[in-house]
Image: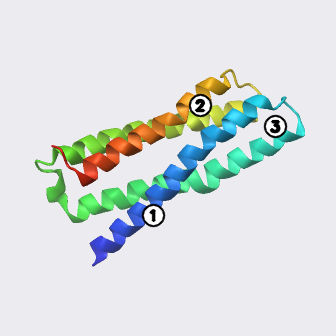
Amino acid sequence: MTYLWIKALHVISIIAWMAALLYLPRLFVYHCEAKPGSEMSEKLKVMERRLHRAIMNPAMMAAWIFGLTMVFLNPGLLQGQGWLHAKIFFVLILTATHVMMGRWRAAFAEDRNKNSQKFYRFANEVPTVLMILIVIMVIVRPF
């Protein structure tokens, strides 16, 4: 029963993390339109900071903690389970994407963004593609 509670908390964490990963780049697109120092720019800075610190970071940490706890409770998952190794690989890329978004947020906070709206529109697709790959690994288990 404990394993199922951990699994449920893992899924809840992933949902929150993905919501933030999909929303933050959209805020960046809007931020590109705002003049540095304007009221809109300052409002977006607050929204981005709160999303990153209050939702994205805690959700990512919870997802990792609950995911690793499931492996700890069931270490046999790591033996001969190619799908899990692939999932972990994609989650590592998702984590790297999270870190990059944090750097982009910091650049906006300091009014030194160098990327375009088009860049952030593309960046917004990366978590989606990774989410699709991760879900396929977990549900279909092709390896």
**Total marks placed:** 3
Left or right placement of residue 111 versus residue 141 in this view:
right
Helix, strand or loop for disc 3: helix
Q: Position of residue 73 (x, y in %)?
A: 23, 65
Please report the residue visible at 14 percent of the width from the left and 58 percent of the height from the top. 76
Q: Is residue 95 visible?
A: no
Splitting the image into 4 quarters, where does residue 7 fall?
bottom left
Q: Residues within 10 Å of mark 1 (few under 14, many from 20)?
A: some
Q: Position of residue 134 (x, y in %)?
A: 33, 46
- Residue 121 image label: 2
Q: Residues within 10 Å of mark 3 (few under 14, many from 20)?
A: many
Left or right placement of residue 59 versus residue 81 in this view:
right
Helix, strand or loop for disc 1: helix
Of marks 1 and 3, which one's residue comes earlier in the chain?
1
State if disc 1 and disc 2 touch (CB < 8 Å).
no
- Residue 42 image label: none
Helix, strand or loop for disc 2: helix
Q: Is residue 121 above or below residue 7?
A: above
Residue pointed to by mark 3: 41
| Amino acid type, label 1 | Ile
| Amino acid type, label 2 | Arg
**Observer-nearest of 120 and 45:** 120
Splitting the image into 4 quarters, where does residue 38 fall?
top right
Residue pointed to by mark 1: 12
Q: Is residue 19 visible?
A: yes
In three-dimensional space, the C-alpha distance between marks 1 and 3, rounded to whole angstroms, equals 31 Å
Please report the residue visible at 74 percent of the width from the left and 25 percent of the height from the top. 112
In the rendered image, the quadrant that contains the N terminus is bottom left
| Amino acid type, label 3 | Ser
In the rendered image, the quadrant that contains the C terminus is top left
